[in-house]
Image (spheres, grey):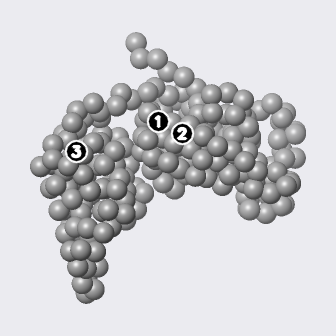
Amino acid sequence: MTQTKVIPIFPLDLVLFPRQELPLRIFEPRYKQLVDDCMLGDGQFGVCLIDEKNSVNGWNSPKLVGTIAKITKCEDIEIDGLQLHIDTIGRNSFKIKKIIPPPIPQPTNYDPLSVEGHQEISEIHEKVGTEAKMYIQAEVEMIPEIDENISLDQWERLVELWKKKTVTQALPQVVEPHTLEHVLEQYYLTTDTPTIDYIYSLSALGANDPNDLQPILEATIMDDLIQKVEELLTVK
């Protein structure tokens, strides 16, 4: 039987891949609580792309497949402690089996950037009890990593698709071949020994929208992953 565990969930407008670095600025009270709880525990939480078609008690709902983020650094941005900066790195991907909603619904006209918004949430939190979790949690199961290798031929085909898409989308501007090679070098994507991390990075480079990357995160075998990346990088 597959083991599950409960973790905090941070819905974001992005897809985090395993081993990818993700810096975050934390200013909402509920996510400051999430970070505080993580720092007292194993320093891990789940990052999921926002599911724009659903909500959880009024808050942004997560897609059902995400990636564990491990906090590697946490520091106050300002003396008042109202903002934090954290550095994280992606670990395993996971699938949500059950969402655990926060007891606090999103207030009407809530503005997370305003002092009033912070005060409103703090007052509601005191009423329901400060031990209550303001953030979404979920029961999740880990997804095994793809342990298959990508061949150099497969990798070079994906790179050529990326180049063609980049050139086509730039029209009528002309993109010179040496410019494309320079971009690949900048993102450390020039290699004769590609790994799955190279595929993730090339996908992120070739995506126009975070939703384009979700199917790639959800792929569980190499053939499916390659197919999804080809679809992403093929000029429609």
Earlier in the chain: of badge 3 and badge 1, it is 1
Residue 106 image position (x, y, % from top left): 71, 50
131 and 70: which is toward the camera: 70
Tell me, for residue 193, which label it has, or none.
3
Q: Residue at x 84, y 33 (%)?
A: 129
Q: In this figure, which residue is indicated by the disc labeled 1? A: 91
Q: Residue at x 72, y 29 (%)?
A: 40
Where 46 sits versus 24, above or below?
Answer: above
Q: Residue type at mark 1? A: Arg
Mark 3 Cα within 10 Å, few/some/many (few <14, many 20+)?
Answer: few
Q: Is residue 212 visible?
A: no
39 horizontally vs 168: left or right: right
Earlier in the chain: of badge 3 and badge 2, it is 2
Tell me, for residue 181, which label it has, or none.
none
Q: Residue at x 42, y 57 (%)?
A: 210
111 horizontally vs 190: left or right: right
Q: Residue type at mark 3? A: Thr
Q: The residue tagged with tag 3: helix, strand or loop?
A: loop
Tell me, for residue 69, which label it has, or none.
2
84 and 2: which is toward the camera: 84
Q: The residue tagged with tag 1: helix, strand or loop?
A: strand
137 horizontally vs 226: left or right: right
109 horizontally vs 158: left or right: right
Q: Residue at x 43, y 35 (%)?
A: 93
Could you give the CA–CA distance between mark 1 and mark 2, rounded to whole angstroms?
6 Å
Q: Are marks 3 and 2 in contact (CB under 8 Å)?
A: no
User: How many marks are shown on the rendered structure?
Assistant: 3
Q: Residue most toward the bottom?
A: 172
| Quadrant where the image shows the N terminus | top left
Could you give the CA–CA distance between mark 3 and mark 2, rounded to whole angstroms?
26 Å
